[in-house]
Amino acid sequence: MKKNDLRIIKTKKAIYQALTHLLKDKLLTDINVTELCREASINRGTFYFHYEEVGDVFKEFFEEVIRDLEESYKEPYKHISALQLETLVFKNLDPKTVRIFHHVKKYEDFYRIILSDNVSTTYYYMFFDAIRSNFIEDSKIGKYDESKKYVYSYMTNAIIGLIIEWHRNDFKESVDDMNIHLVETLNVITRS
């Protein structure tokens, strides 16, 4: 079967949604294959055709979310040349081009889970590393400076901090408002 097979896509989407639903009330380690299959309305054979264990589902879904996050992060820079990107100042960043918060809203249930108090910090660090790697990748267009690794970590935590605060406010602010908050935050950080 092909990776783009509609049946596979639908099955995996059902499994991801089932896992997300179960994670609202249980830890990942407490979810077994039988209850995941029941929640996804699939049989165990279908599950084992795609995965070995429940943790594999979470890992694959997390990777999908991170790929979408990376694409969302890069969206404002798609039409900027390498030279322009090297000299980009965040105050020139148009909040309407920011896509990170669209991404978070798209995967809101997932973020509610990984930002909850009962989830391992492992997922926070995976999330942190994914965002930070984008800052480092962008810096390689110019000259990567190892001494800026703390700046990249600081900027990463600024973005995650905004997402956490949005989560604490039950995602009530609009995506557009969050885009403006991000651009304002980045401008404050880069003034120094």
Image (cartoon, helix red, strand yellow):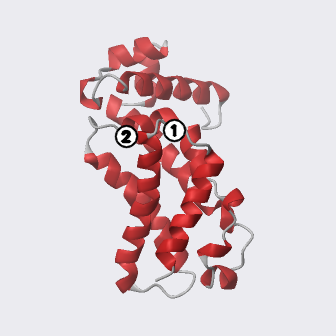
Q: Mark 1: which secondary structure? A: loop
Q: Are marks 2 and 1 in contact (CB under 8 Å)?
A: no
Q: Which mark is residue 114?
A: 2
Vertical position of residue 108 compared to residue 123: above or below: above
Question: Would you say 101 lies left or right of 95 here?
Answer: left
**Camera sees residue 71:** no
The image quarter containing residue 37 is top left
Write the residue at 72% across / 74% down: 80
Q: Earlier in the sequence, mark 2 or mark 1?
A: 2
Query: Dividing the image into 4 quarters, which one contains the N terminus?
Result: top right
The image quarter containing residue 160 is bottom left
Q: Which residue is mark 1?
A: 171
Around disc 1, counting alpha carbons within 10 Å, would you say few (fewer than 14), some (14 to 19), or many (20 or more)?
A: some
The image quarter containing residue 24 is top left
Question: Would you say 78 lies left or right of 130 here?
Answer: right
Q: Residue 155 in the image: x percent, y percent?
A: 44, 68
What is the three-letter code of the residue carrying label 1?
A: Phe
Q: Residue 70 in the image: x percent, y percent?
A: 55, 57
